[in-house]
Image: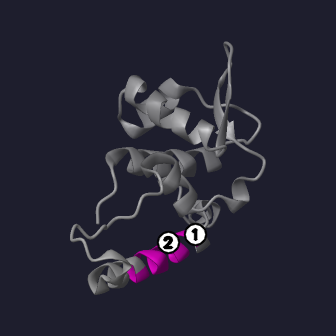
Amino acid sequence: MKFSQATDYALHTMMFLMSQAPDKPVGVQTLADRLGVSQTYLSKMLSKLVKAGLIGSVSGANGGYRLKAHYERISFLDVIHAIEGTASIFECGLNHGEDCLIQKVVMTAEQQMEQYLSDKKIVDVARQHTL
């Protein structure tokens, strides 16, 4: 399974924001420079994180992005869903309904992975590592 580059950037952005003062917004240019990506590309990804309620945006000369008050509860799965959506990674293309044994195996694996990613909080990893 492979997640998009945007998910990689989103996870790294969240880690970086967790290493900053929570009351001071970080500008998109600072984030783009830190990650080595274009400001335009990063802005699209940041919009998804804002829409998902994971970060907030502050407009104005000293504006930027910062974590929401509940940042301690943000999991890896929250960020992945914000960027990738919640569609299943596998759907059987044959027409035999819910009795597809292959789909059951893949769905069970996906549920286990999602549970692990849901349990893994970004703040816990951020405390161990600084970008």
Viewer can see residue 11: yes
Question: Pointer 2: what residue?
Answer: 114
Q: What element carries label 1?
A: helix
Going 24% across and 71% down the picture, which residue do you hit?
A: 95
**Nearer to us in this view, 50 or 99:** 99
Viewer can see residue 19: no
Going 21% across and 71% down the picture, which residue do you hit?
A: 94
Q: What element carries label 2?
A: helix
**Nearer to us in this view, 12 or 57:** 57
Going 64% across and 60% down the picture, which residue do you hit?
A: 123
For mark 2, does the 10 Å Cα neighbourhood hold few (<14), some (14 to 19), or many (20 or more) residues?
some
C-alpha distance separating marks 2 and 1: 6 Å
Q: Residue furthest top?
A: 61
**Nearer to us in this view, 29 or 69:** 69
| Magenta residues (range) | 108-118
Question: Pointer 1: what residue?
Answer: 118
Q: Relative to 64, does residue 119 appear above or below in the rendering?
A: below
Q: Relative to 1, does residue 60 appear above or below in the rendering?
A: above
Residue 42 in picture, x, y percent from top left:
43, 32
Give residue 56's quadrant in the image: top right
Q: Which residue lies furthest to the left in this view?
A: 94
Circles 2 and 1: CB atoms closer than 8 Å: yes
Residue 117 part of the magenta segment: yes
Q: In this view, does 82 lie to the left or right of 124?
A: left
Magenta stretch secondary structure, dominant: helix
